[in-house]
Image (cartoon, helix red, strand yellow):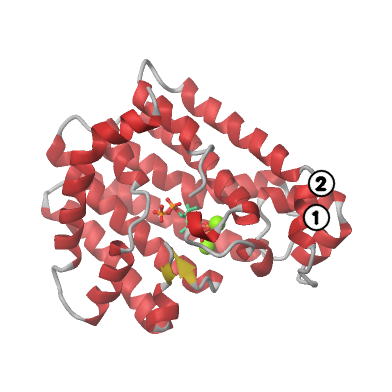
Amino acid sequence: VSAQAVLHEAAPYLDELEQRLETAVERHPGLVAAVGRNAVGAGGKRLRPLLVHLTAPDRELALRAGVAIELAHVATLVHDDLIDGAELRRGRSSAWHEHGARAAKAGGDYLFARAMAELADAGDLEGVEILARACLAIARGEAMQQQQLHDPDTPIDAYLARISLKTGKLFEAACLLGSRDPRLGEFGLALGVAFQIADDILDCVGDTIDTGKIPGADLREGVPTLPLILAARDDEVVREALAGGPKREALVRVAATGALDRSRALALDYARKAREFLRNEPDLEALTHIVIDRER
Ligand code: IPE
Ligand code: IPE
Ligand code: MG
Ligand code: MG
């Protein structure tokens, strides 16, 4: 099954999801909701709802849980950009950059709360628990990232632990919200790790036109991502840059060390690991390829 075929099949679901997202952010109109509306309305790949859709037994559950997980995801982006000092998101001025730090904090909180309320209002307490756990993991992952900042000697295992928490757990939650099946949860976790490694590569080589983000943010902020950790082992300039020194030339040198290819190899390992959890689920299998071979 091709990625296009998966997206084609999901198009009606994704269309209705957009309407439901709009309705959900408008529940309590005001300045804070406006921050949320802008962030949600800026688009994005809607990958987590797509995972819910592909794993859910029925449409209503897929829509409700899809809305909840995308709202929680956008909440993390709003807060993440504040923490990372990122000025661009989804090709637009990020929430804090547009509305200020306080509004971004409140807007992110609003989105988290709306996400939980979507599930709670439907009486889906198990769903609330799945999503709440994932949000807690994200907070722990972001905290771990702060501790790892500017450390070029961050062990690969510590990096993997961090991205499992900050990204993998929400992918896991998407699959669990849809299926309530631990096997698919494990699939989602491995898929999310592969996805984040690809994101970390894109931060080194991606194009703003495609990603909607400004490349080099991780190096600038001193976030030890896999490509940066690997490159720092071989290149003193990258090492110094990651530790907080001058950034000039460093990104070009990352590519020259071969760290991007080695990072891609590990992403492919995780995609393969994700596939091992599947049992004749071709749509999900297609996702294990597109999370890596993507430009946005
Ligand atoms: C961005 O997620 C945050 C990461 C986990 C890397 P996405 O790349 O899914 O962002 P959108 O939703 O498409 O904007
Ligand atoms: C993922 O990491 C952040 C979240 C879990 C919200 P990044 O910091 O790399 O995400 P981007 O690159 O800003 O989207
Ligand atoms: Mg970020
Ligand atoms: Mg990134």
Question: Which residue: 60% across, 29% down?
Answer: 269
Q: Tell me the CA gap for discs 1 and 2.
A: 6 Å
Question: Which residue: 44% across, 65% down?
Answer: 89
Q: Is residue 110 visible?
A: no
Question: Which residue: 32% across, 31% down?
Answer: 6
Instruction: Say which quarter of the image contains residue 100.
Output: bottom left
Check disc 2: other Cα within 10 Å, few if <14, some if 14-19, many if 20+.
some
- Left or right of 294 on screen, residue 254: right
**Marks 1 and 2 in Cβ contact (< 8 Å):** yes
Q: What element does badge 1 sit on?
A: helix
Question: Which residue: 44% across, 45% down?
Answer: 169
The residue carrying mark 2 is 257
Q: Give the label on residue 253, or none.
A: 1
Q: What element does badge 2 sit on?
A: loop
Looking at the image, residue 129 lies above or below residue 74: above
- Left or right of 58 on screen, residue 72: right
Looking at the image, residue 254 lies above or below residue 40: above
The percent coordinates of residue 80 (x first, y second) are: 47, 66
